[in-house]
Amino acid sequence: MKLIVFSLAALMPIWAADEGSTEQIKRIHESAGVLSEILHAGDKSIPEDLLRKAHCVGVVPNLKRAGFIVGAKYGKGVVTCRVPNGEGWSAVSTIRIEGGSVGLQIGAGETDVIFIVMNRSGEDRLLKDKFTLGGDASVMAGPVGRSAQAETDAMMKAEMLSYSRSHGVFAGVSIEGATLRPDNDDNTRIYGRPITQREILHGDIAPPPAERPLIAELNSYAPFKKGE
């Protein structure tokens, strides 16, 4: 009897994580869907050469916006990074984006936001408790097109490139003044224990099954190559 009680107690955190993470798993699925649709958009997608160079990729589905030029008001999404000294992409971490503006948006609605982190400096920003896009981290509207080239010096030096999709239109878009930070509560619900964003993005935890479609998309379009 004691053995049974102990076994049930040991399983309780896992059950609690599964029960409490329904909303979080749904967001991961939505992010995977947004990413898949954009990556399969041919000439209206993110350039492949940028994806291959990216250190991290983030997706914020259904970001709430309201008012004239007021874009990013509140949203949650996910981010994954290339695993250091490994092959492929890390498990995903839940992030929150709040305030600021996303390009020239008129009226209320929802916008899918995608950003790619282009260098180590930008990746280090993600490991902070909180940072400001366009302030602490340099961010620019990314180019669109399967074979488009990021030719300007400013774009090549930007820590992040950002995009949005609203009403079916996908384009590079500037994000200014929005703050981005990890959602530690959601990450705890997903992984069943307190865990830092650094642990997740550095590959210290294996991706659960719900995250595999998103990671498979990135592995398909931006695979790890020896020597990178």
Image (spheres, rainbow, N blue to C red):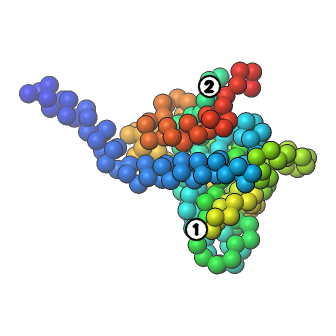
Name the side, left or right, on which 24 lies relative to 31.
left
Query: Residue at the location (48% across, 30% down)?
Result: 206
Q: Nearer the viewer, residue 213 or 91?
A: 213
Between the C-alphas of marks 2 and 1, the distance is 34 Å
What kind of element bears circle 2? loop
Residue on which the image places disc 2: 87
- Which x, y percent locates residue 88? 61, 29
**Would you say the residues marked 2 and 1 are in contact, meaning their CB atoms lie under 8 Å apart?**
no
Q: Position of residue 226 (x, y in %)?
A: 71, 21
Q: Secondary structure at mark 1?
A: strand
Q: Is residue 178 left or right of residue 149?
A: left
Q: Amino acid type of disc 1?
A: Glu
Instruction: Judge whether 136 appears above or below 14 on screen.
Output: below
Q: Position of residue 124 (x, y in %)?
A: 69, 40
Q: Give the number of callouts.
A: 2
Instruction: For the N terminus, give its image quadrant.
Output: top left
Q: Quadrant of residue 209?
A: top left
Q: Residue 98 appears at what percent x and percent y? A: 60, 62
Regarding residue 116, the answer to whether it shows in the image is yes
How many neighbours does mark 1 have within 10 angstroms: few (below 14), some (14-19), or many (20 or more)?
many
Residue farthest toward the front in the current orientation of the protein: 42
| 155 sits to left or right of 188 | right
Q: Which residue is mark 1?
A: 110
Residue 182 visible to the viewer: no
Residue at the extreme left of the image, as rendered: 1
Q: Residue at x 70, y 46 (%)?
A: 116
Residue 95 vs residue 218, the one in the foreground:
218
Question: At label 2, which amino acid type do we have?
Answer: Glu
Give the answer, above or below, for where 95 lies relative to 6.
below
Q: Residues within 10 Å of mark 2 (few under 14, many from 20)?
A: few
Which of the labelled discs sits on residue 172, or is there none?
none
The quadrant where residue 83 appears: top right
